[in-house]
């Protein structure tokens, strides 16, 4: 059963990784490739949000195949995004800063709303009309494109890109 679950997860994920891997190597400026990568991830998340949630919940509950998959993700699509963020920073298309923090900011604008609104809808924690509107804004590609363009525009405006001092 565990091998079957692992194979199902890998087959489900493989098309996204293949698409994103091809985008990383396209002959486009880094910021344009980053935009494409984030849109591809958003499209995939919107189409697969329930499965994503199930995999994450299975991993959290101790399902070994789901845990192995989730633990392997850092070296997969996030690594591709981080590579292009760093390239965009070196090309002065994005401000200096921790690439992981830039990726977190972009994912907060695109992928996180999809997953959160699905959970909100499933749990019926908000009025139905509000939930429908939030789900529509989170899932519809035009709204995701708009949020991504806002986020990338905000990153490329004059910004304070000095390292942040953190307390330990």
Image: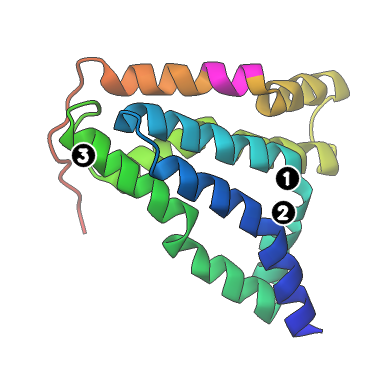
Which residue is drawn at the image coordinates 45% and 18% (left, top)?
Answer: 149
Bin the neighbour count of mark 1 within 10 Å (Cα to Cα): few under 14, some 14-19, many 20 and up.
Answer: many
Residue 54 located left or right of residue 59: right
Residue 40 quadrant: top right
Bin the neighbour count of mark 2 within 10 Å (Cα to Cα): few under 14, some 14-19, many 20 and up.
Answer: some
Picture coordinates of residue 167 (x, y %)? 20, 53
Which image quadrant: the N terminus?
bottom right
First in residue order: circle 1 vs circle 3 = 1
Q: Given contact means CB atoms under 8 Å apart, are the residues at marks 1 and 2 in contact? A: yes
Residue identified by numbered label 2: 53
The one nearer the camera, 51 or 122, is 51
Magenta region, residue range: 142-146
Main SS of residues in magenta:
helix
Which residue is drawn at the image coordinates 65% and 57% (left, top)?
Answer: 13
Residue 146 located left or right of residue 117: left
Which residue is drawn at the image coordinates 29% and 44% (left, top)?
Answer: 99
> Tag 1, which secondary structure?
helix
Q: Can residue 62 be seen here? A: no
Chosen colour scheme: rainbow
Residue identified by numbered label 1: 49
> Tag 3, which secondary structure?
loop
Residue 32 located left or right of residue 3: left
Q: Which mark is residue 97?
A: 3
Structural distance between the alpha carbons of marks 1 and 2: 6 Å
Picture coordinates of residue 49 (x, y %)? 73, 45
């Amino acid at each position: 059963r565990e091998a079957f679950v692992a194979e199902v997860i890998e087959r489900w994920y493989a098309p996204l990784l293949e698409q994103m891997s091809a985008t990383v190597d396209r002959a486009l400026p880094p910021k344009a490739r980053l935009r494409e990568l984030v849109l591809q991830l958003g499209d995939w998340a919107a189409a697969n949000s329930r499965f994503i949630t199930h995999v994450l919940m299975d991993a959290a509950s101790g399902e070994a195949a789901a845990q192995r998959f989730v633990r392997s993700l850092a070296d997969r699509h996030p690594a591709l995004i981080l590579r292009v963020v760093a390239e965009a920073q070196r090309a002065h298309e994005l401000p200096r800063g921790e690439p992981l923090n830039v990726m977190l900011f972009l994912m907060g604008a695109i992928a996180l709303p999809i997953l959160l609104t699905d959970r909100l809808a499933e749990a019926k924690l908000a009025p139905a009309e509000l939930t429908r509107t939030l789900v529509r804004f989170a899932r519809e590609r035009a709204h995701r494109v708009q949020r991504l363009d806002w986020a990338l525009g905000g990153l490329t405006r004059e910004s304070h890109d000095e390292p942040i001092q953190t307390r330990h």
